Image (spheres, rainbow, N blue to C red):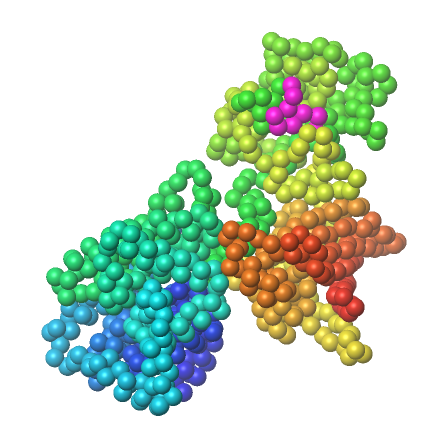
C-alpha cells in the first residue's frame, strides 16, 4: 500500500528503489537489482532494514526537492541501503532499532548531498563515502545506546536458511558450501556477497549472474582485478587472510569495475590501471585495518574510495594524452555502452567543444598543397592549405594562364571562416606576375582573425587593396574579408590558409580541423571535424530550405504517421520533448521509446536510443541517423552505430567480452541523396539509407530505408527489412 502511494506521488519511485541496489555496481539494470534484493533478503531482517533505509532516503530526497533524475538513478539511495544492511546484520529488530535506522538514513542522505557538492566541483564521485561515515558514526554511538542489541544471526546459519526457505533452501546452501572449488574462486564469490553483508557462495553466485546479465565487461574486470590481487598477495607473501577475513577483497572487485569500465572507457590501458592499483589497495587495506582496529571499526570500502577518487583526480589533471586512458564524459551506466559510445562519438561529437570553422571561400576549390606539402608547408608551418579553383577538366586557369586574371580563383571573394575579430592586416604588397615570387614579403597581403583565446586563422596571398576590413572589426562567418590574389611567395594565384595560436602574420601553424565540408571525388562526400587532403576538391555545405525547415523539430511538435501491415492500418505518433538537461528527443507515444537528436546549422543526427527496438521510432533512428541540411546530388554520408545496438544479441554478448581489446562486429550507416524534383509550387527531396551489419568485415544482413521530404516536412518514411516493406505516411 505504501509503495503504491509512493508510485502515485512519484511515478518512477519504484525504479529509484531498484536503481539504489544496482548503483553499488554503478548500474541501472532491473534483473541485477532484483537479484541483489533477493540476496539481501537471505538475512530477512537485514534485507528489510536495507529496503526501509532506501525508501527513507529516496523519499526524503524527493520531498526536500533534490534533483529528481538523481533520485531515479539511485544515487541518493545506495549509501543508505548499505547502512541499513549493515545495521540489520549487526543489531536485533525492535522499535528503537527502526527509529535509529530512519534517522541514520536521513543523515546518510545529508552526508551524500554535502559530499556531492564538494566533490562534484572537481568532477569526482562521492562513491560509498557517505556509507562509511554513517556506519562508523552509528557503530560508535551504539555503544552508548542500551536498546540497540547485538544480533546473534549468523551463528546459527543453518537454522536461518531453513527458516528462510525450508529444507530445499537448506540443502542448496549445504551443497554450495560443499563444492570443491579452488580457494580463490570461493573467496571471489564470497567477496561479492560481502558487499551486501552476505558471506556465502550462493549470494555471490547470484550477484555474479546479475553482473553478467548487466555487463560482460564489468564481470571481466571484476574477475581480472580480484585474480590480480590474489596473485599479488601470493607473490609478495602478503597475508592472504586479509582477503578471506570478512572477504574484504570486494575492494578489488569494486575498484576494478569502477576504473576498468565505468569512470574510464574500457580498454587495455584501463585494465592495466586496475592492475596498477592492486598493490595500492592492499596497502590501504592493511594500514586502514590496523588503524581502525584501535576504534573497533572495520575498514569496509575505504580503500576502494580512496584509490578510485585519487586516481580519477590525477587523470583529470593531465595536460596531454587525455585519452590514454580516456575518462567517460557522458555516463551511460554500462561499460559496454561507455566504450561503444566513445568509439563513435569521438568523431561525431568531437566538434561540440570546438569553435566551428568553415572553408574561407564560396563554391568548390582544390587543395593544391595540403598538410606536409611538397613546397612550403614544412616543419612549424606544416598544418596549412593552399586552395585554387579548377574547371571540369581540372585546369586552374583559362586561355594561356599568362596573367593573374586568367586564373579562376583570382579576385574571387575570401570570406570569414568563423565569427571573430580582425587582429592583423598587411595590405601593402603588390601582386606578382605569373611565375614570379616575392621572397622578401613571404606571406604577401594577409589577414589574421581571432576566433577565441589561442585560436587564430590566417589568410594570405590576397590581392592588393582588396581587403575590406579593419583592425579590431568584428566580422561574422561568411562576411567577405578580401579577394584572392597573387602577392608574396606566390608564383600563381592561390589562397593560403592556416590556423595558429598567436596573432602575428606567419606564426607557427596549429593542427586544428574544419567543422565540416563537402568533397567531390566522383560522388559528393561529407566530412565532419576533418582536415582536407591534398588533391581534394572541397566546398562548404549550402543549406536547402526544404530540409532546413523539415529537420527543425520544436519541443511540443508531434509527428503522426499511418501504415498498413497485412491489410491492417496502424497509427503512431512521436512527440518532440526535452529532458531536464535540455537534451531534445522524440518520444514514441505507443512504446515509450526515446530517440535523442542534435540539430546544427549543417546537420541533423541522432545521438542515443532508449527503449523498445521493435518500435518504428527505432527504424527512424537507424534510417535518419545522420542527415545533412543541404542537397547535393550523389551526396553520400557514411557513419557507424554504437555496437550496443547490434541486432544479433548472441554475437553482441561474445563481442562484449573482448570489445576493450578487439572488435569483430561492425554496424555501419550510409545515406545517398537523390536529385531533388520540383513541381510548380513544391520541391521533393529524397534519400536512401542502408544499415549494414557485419561480422569480421563480411556483410551479414542489411536494413534499407527511404526518406522523402516535401512541403517543408518529413512526408514519407519507408522501411525495407528483408522481404517485408512498410510505408509510413505522414498524417497532417
Percent across and percent down for residue 505 are 55, 20
Dividing the picture into quadrants, the one containing residue 555 is bottom right
* 473 to 160, vertically: above or below: above
* 102 to 330, vertically: above or below: below
Residues drawn in magenta? 367-375
Dividing the picture into quadrants, the one containing residue 293 is bottom left
Percent across and percent down for residue 15 are 45, 73
Between 96 and 723, the one nearer to me in the picture = 723
Quadrant location of the N terminus in the rendered image: bottom left
Quadrant location of the C terminus in the rendered image: bottom right
Regarding residue 697, the answer to whether it shows in the image is: yes
Identify the residue at the far right of this view. 680
Residue drawn at x 69%, y 52% is 627
- Asked whether residue 372 is drawn in magenta, I would say yes
Between 676 and 239, the one nearer to me in the picture = 239
Residue drawn at x 64%, y 41% is 516
- Asked whether residue 123 is drawn in magenta, I would say no
Q: How many marks?
A: 0
Residue drawn at x 40%, y 72% is 205
Dividing the picture into quadrants, the one containing residue 680 is bottom right
Percent across and percent down for residue 645 are 60, 61
In this rendering, position of residue 63 left or right of residue 689: left
Magenta stretch, main secondary structure, is loop
In this rendering, position of residue 732 left or right of residue 160: right
In this rendering, position of residue 539 left or right of residue 134: right
Percent across and percent down for residue 209 are 45, 71
Regarding residue 691, the answer to whether it shows in the image is: no
Amino acid at each position: 500500500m505504501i509503495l503504491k502511494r509512493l508510485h502515485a506521488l512519484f511515478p518512477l519511485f519504484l525504479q529509484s528503489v531498484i536503481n539504489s541496489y544496482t548503483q553499488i555496481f554503478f548500474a541501472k539494470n532491473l534483473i541485477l537489482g532484483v537479484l541483489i534484493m533477493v540476496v539481501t533478503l537471505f538475512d530477512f531482517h537485514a534485507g528489510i532494514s536495507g529496503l526501509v533505509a532506501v525508501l527513507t532516503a529516496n523519499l526524503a530526497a524527493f520531498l526536500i526537492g533534490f534533483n529528481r533524475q538523481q533520485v531515479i538513478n539511485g544515487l541518493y539511495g545506495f549509501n543508505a541501503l548499505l547502512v541499513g544492511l549493515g545495521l540489520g546484520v549487526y543489531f536485533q529488530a525492535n522499535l528503537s532499532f527502526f527509529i535509529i535506522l530512519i534517522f541514520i538514513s536521513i543523515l546518510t542522505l545529508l552526508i551524500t548531498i554535502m559530499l556531492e557538492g564538494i566533490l562534484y566541483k572537481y568532477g569526482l564521485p562521492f562513491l560509498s563515502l557517505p556509507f562509511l561515515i554513517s556506519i562508523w558514526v552509528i557503530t560508535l554511538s551504539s555503544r552508548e545506546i542500551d536498546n540497540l542489541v547485538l544480533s546473534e544471526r549468523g551463528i546459527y546459519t543453518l537454522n536461518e536458511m531453513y527458516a528462510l526457505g525450508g529444507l530445499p533452501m537448506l540443502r542448496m546452501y549445504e551443497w554450495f558450501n560443499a563444492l570443491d572449488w579452488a580457494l580463490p574462486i570461493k573467496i571471489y564469490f564470497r567477496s561479492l556477497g560481502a558487499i551486501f553483508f552476505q558471506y556465502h557462495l550462493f549470494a555471490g553466485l547470484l550477484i555474479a549472474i546479475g553482473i553478467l546479465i548487466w555487463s560482460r565487461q564489468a564481470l571481466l574486470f571484476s574477475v581480472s582485478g580480484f585474480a590480480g590481487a590474489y596473485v599479488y598477495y601470493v607473490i609478495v607473501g602478503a597475508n592472504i587472510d586479509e582477503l578471506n577475513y570478512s572477504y574484504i577483497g570486494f575492494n578489488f572487485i569494486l575498484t576494478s569495475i569502477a576504473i576498468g569500465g565505468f569512470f574510464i572507457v574500457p580498454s587495455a590501458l584501463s585494465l592495466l590501471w586496475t592492475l596498477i592499483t592492486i598493490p595500492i589497495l592492499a596497502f590501504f587495506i592493511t594500514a586502514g585495518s590496523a588503524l581502525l582496529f584501535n576504534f573497533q571499526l572495520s575498514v569496509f570500502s575505504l580503500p576502494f574510495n580512496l584509490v578510485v577518487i585519487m586516481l580519477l583526480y590525477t587523470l583529470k589533471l593531465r595536460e596531454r594524452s587525455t585519452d590514454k586512458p580516456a575518462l567517460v564524459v557522458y555516463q551511460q551506466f554500462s561499460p559496454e555502452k561507455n566504450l561503444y559510445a566513445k568509439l563513435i562519438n569521438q568523431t561525431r561529437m568531437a566538434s561540440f567543444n570546438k569553435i566551428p570553422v568553415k572553408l574561407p571561400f564560396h563554391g568548390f576549390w582544390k587543395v593544391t598543397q595540403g598538410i606536409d606539402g611538397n613546397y612550403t608547408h614544412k616543419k612549424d608551418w606544416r598544418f596549412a592549405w593552399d586552395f585554387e579553383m579548377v574547371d571540369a577538366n581540372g585546369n586552374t586557369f583559362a586561355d594561356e594562364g599568362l596573367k593573374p586574371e586568367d586564373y579562376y580563383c583570382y579576385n574571387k571573394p575570401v570570406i570569414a571562416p568563423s565569427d571573430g575579430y580582425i587582429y592583423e592586416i598587411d595590405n601593402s604588397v603588390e601582386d606578382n606576375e605569373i611565375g614570379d615570387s616575392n621572397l622578401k614579403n613571404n606571406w604577401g597581403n594577409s589577414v589574421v582573425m581571432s576566433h577565441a583565446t589561442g585560436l587564430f586563422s590566417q589568410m594570405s596571398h590576397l590581392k592588393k587593396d582588396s581587403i575590406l576590413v579593419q583592425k579590431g572589426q568584428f566580422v561574422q562567418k561568411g562576411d567577405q574579408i578580401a579577394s584572392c590574389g597573387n602577392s608574396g611567395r606566390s608564383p600563381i594565384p592561390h589562397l593560403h590558409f592556416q590556423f595558429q595560436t598567436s596573432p602575428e602574420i606567419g606564426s607557427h601553424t596549429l593542427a586544428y580541423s574544419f567543422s565540416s565540408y563537402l568533397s567531390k571525388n566522383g560522388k559528393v562526400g561529407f566530412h565532419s571535424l576533418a582536415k582536407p587532403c591534398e588533391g581534394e576538391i572541397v566546398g562548404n555545405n549550402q543549406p536547402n530550405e526544404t530540409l532546413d525547415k523539415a529537420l527543425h523539430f520544436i519541443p511540443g511538435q508531434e509527428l503522426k504517421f499511418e501504415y498498413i501491415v497485412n491489410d491492417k492500418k496502424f497509427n503512431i505518433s512521436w512527440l518532440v520533448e526535452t529532458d531536464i538537461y535540455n537534451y531534445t528527443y522524440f518520444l514514441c507515444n505507443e512504446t515509450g521509446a526515446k530517440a535523442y537528436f542534435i540539430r546544427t546549422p549543417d546537420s541533423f543526427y541522432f545521438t542515443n536510443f532508449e527503449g523498445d527496438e521493435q518500435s518504428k521510432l527505432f527504424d527512424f533512428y537507424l534510417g535518419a541517423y545522420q542527415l545533412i541540411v543541404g542537397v547535393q546530388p550523389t551526396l553520400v554520408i557514411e557513419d557507424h552505430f554504437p555496437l550496443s545496438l547490434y541486432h544479433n544479441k548472441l554475437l553482441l554478448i561474445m563481442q562484449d567480452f573482448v570489445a576493450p581489446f578487439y572488435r569483430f562486429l561492425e554496424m555501419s550507416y550510409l545515406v545517398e541523396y537523390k536529385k531533388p524534383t520540383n513541381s510548380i509550387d513544391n520541391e521533393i527531396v529524397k534519400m536512401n539509407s542502408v544499415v549494414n551489419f557485419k561480422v569480421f568485415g563480411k556483410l551479414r544482413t542489411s536494413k534499407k530505408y527511404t526518406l522523402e521530404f516535401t512541403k517543408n516536412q518529413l512526408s514519407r518514411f519507408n522501411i525495407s527489412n528483408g522481404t517485408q516493406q512498410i510505408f509510413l505516411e505522414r498524417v497532417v
